[in-house]
Image (spheres, rainbow, N blue to C red):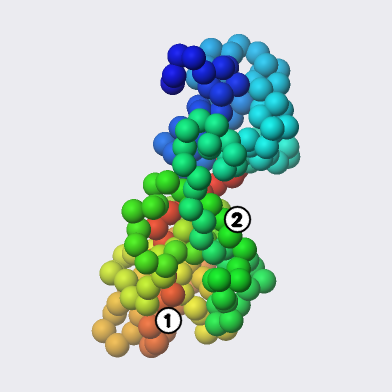
């Protein structure tokens, strides 16, 4: 960290670096430990001031629901993040129009991907076994095929978007959940809409 940064900016930079490193923000205690702030109240004070300046956004009901705004990124010398379409639970894939959709920030670690990307929330608990939980934000590279074993987004028989591990088996395709409470989906039509390339979590379960 630059030596001439104020403690407030050091807190902001620490949050940014932990999000880039771990995929989720640090807790108040982790911020305190990382910056030598012994009092949680002191950390909360910095967070409140950062929020008042619109450098961060928080959800007070969740311990890690915190993200850095573009204004906050600019304050620590990080370029404005790119945005991608965000597919809400009310959007139907067949009528989804990326140009008119809500937008969400693209993490720096995913800017290496070329082609079309979109984001959506994990719709259910079918992938809990590999640490993908309902409500996690998934970043998906649009494509209509995948290699065996890759995690993909696909349309089920009801035209709903689901997430599963893809396997090609002779004349059929299997979408395997990572939760024993869910059954695999077998189809004779290749209905992949994208491959999961990233995940972002705003809270720890």
As drawn, the label of residue 29 is: none
Q: Is residue 5 above or below residue 128?
A: above
Dot 1 lies on which element?
Answer: loop
Name the residue: 50% across, 27% down: 14
Q: Quadrant of the C terminus?
A: top right
147 to the left or right of 52: left
127 to the left or right of 49: left
| Total tally of numbered discs in the picture | 2
Question: Which residue does the numbered mark 1 point to in the structure image?
Answer: 191
Name the residue: 60% across, 68% down: 101
Residue 115, quarter of picture: bottom left
Q: Pick whichever, 123 or 34, lies toward us.
A: 34
Q: Pick whichever, 76 or 27, lies toward us.
A: 76
Q: Are marks 1 and 2 in contact (CB under 8 Å)?
A: no
Earlier in the chain: of badge 1 and badge 2, it is 2
Name the residue: 61% across, 71% down: 100
Residue 15 in sight from this viewpoint? no
Q: Is residue 171 above or below residue 143?
A: below
Residue 135 in percent (x, y) is at 60, 55
Q: What crowding class fits label 2: few (fewer than 14 Cα within 10 Å), some (14-19), or many (20 or more)?
A: some
Dot 2 lies on which element?
Answer: loop
Name the residue: 42% across, 67% down: 116
Residue 2 in percent (x, y) is at 44, 19
Q: Quadrant of the N terminus?
A: top left
Residue 130 in percent (x, y) is at 43, 53
Residue 101 in sight from this viewpoint? yes
Residue 66 in percent (x, y) is at 62, 39
Question: Which residue does the numbered mark 2 point to in the structure image?
Answer: 135
Residue 69, quarter of picture: top right
Q: What crowding class fits label 1: few (fewer than 14 Cα within 10 Å), some (14-19), or many (20 or more)?
A: some
Q: Is residue 15 above or below residue 130?
A: above
Label 1 to label 2: alpha-carbon separation? 23 Å
């Amino acid at each position: 960290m630059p030596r001439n940064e104020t403690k407030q900016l050091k807190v902001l930079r620490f949050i940014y670096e932990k999000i880039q490193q771990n995929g989720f923000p640090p807790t108040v205690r982790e911020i305190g430990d990382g910056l030598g702030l012994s009092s949680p109240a002191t950390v909360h004070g910095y967070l409140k001031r950062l929020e008042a300046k619109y450098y961060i956004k928080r959800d007070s009901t969740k311990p890690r629901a915190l993200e850095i705004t573009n204004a906050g990124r600019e304050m620590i010398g990080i370029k404005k993040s790119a945005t991608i379409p965000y597919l809400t639970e009310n959007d139907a894939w067949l009528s989804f129009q990326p140009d008119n959709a809500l937008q969400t920030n693209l993490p720096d670690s995913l800017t290496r991907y070329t082609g079309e990307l979109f984001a959506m929330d994990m719709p259910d608990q079918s992938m809990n076994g590999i640490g993908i939980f309902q409500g996690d934000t998934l970043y998906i590279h649009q494509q209509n095929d995948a290699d065996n074993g890759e995690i993909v987004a696909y349309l089920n028989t009801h035209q709903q978007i689901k997430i599963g591990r893809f396997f090609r088996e002779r004349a059929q395709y299997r979408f395997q959940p990572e939760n024993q409470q869910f059954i695999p989906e077998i189809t004779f039509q290749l209905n992949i809409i994208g491959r999961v390339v990233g995940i972002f979590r705003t809270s720890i379960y």
